[in-house]
Image: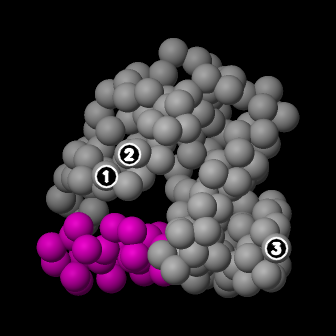
Amino acid sequence: MVRIKIATKADTEVLALLGRLTWAESHGHYIEDKNDVLKYLNEHFSVTKTKQNLDNPKLIFCIIYVDDLPVGYAKLVVNALNENIASQNSVQLERIFILNDFIPLKIGKQLLTFVEEKAKSLQLDTMWLTVYIKNERAIRFYEKNKFKNVGELNFIVNGKGYENIIFSKRL
């Protein structure tokens, strides 16, 4: 059974671990220096950083479970602006990750639908995100779900830029 819920402070450790594991699985192999990967994980997915994020009212985290096992999550940034997005009522889908072993279950679409409905309930009209240009599976997923390429930016990991596509979708 698949279940999705909005994360609370009680989920801090689960969210920190999911973030760390899923980011390493999905992006770690693109980063040449593995020390950079470790540094990035420690900075962005510590329990302390996750707790701070959960305290921020502009951030919404959702966790997806399969048979009561947490297997992925999404992070929304409410009213996040981007020069490539015309809307002033937009939301950034900063992260949407599923553990590799659970990707074949095709539950990413359920998580995406859940966060889109959450954004609509907050009267946000546009969702945008960035994806690494070499992440072909993710690019196909977003295109299949009606996101359009609206620009590009560099995602910085420890001083090194990685070219990303900016995708946007009207909700």
Name the spot of residue 31 as percent of width and height, x first: 22, 70
For the point 45% across and 36% down, the residue is: 143
Closer-to-camera residue (41/170): 170
Name the spot of residue 87 as percent of width and height, x first: 58, 18
Label 2 SS: helix
Name the spot of residue 71 as percent of width and height, x first: 64, 76
Residue under label 3: 1
- Cα distance, mark 3 to mark 2? 27 Å
Which of the 4 image quarters holds residue 13?
bottom right
For the point 78% across and 32% down, the residue is: 120
Q: Which mark is residue 136?
A: 1
Indicate left or right for 6 with 48 as reference. Answer: right
For the point 75% across and 49% down, the residue is: 114
- Foreground mark, 3 or 2? 3
Label 3 SS: loop
Q: Is residue 131 above or below residue 81?
A: below
Q: Amino acid at mark 3?
A: Met
- Cα distance, mark 1 to mark 3? 28 Å
Q: Amino acid at mark 1?
A: Glu
| Magenta-tinted stretch | 19-44
Q: Amino acid at mark 2?
A: Ile
Of callouts 1 and 3, which one flags the residue occurring earlier in the amino acid sequence? 3
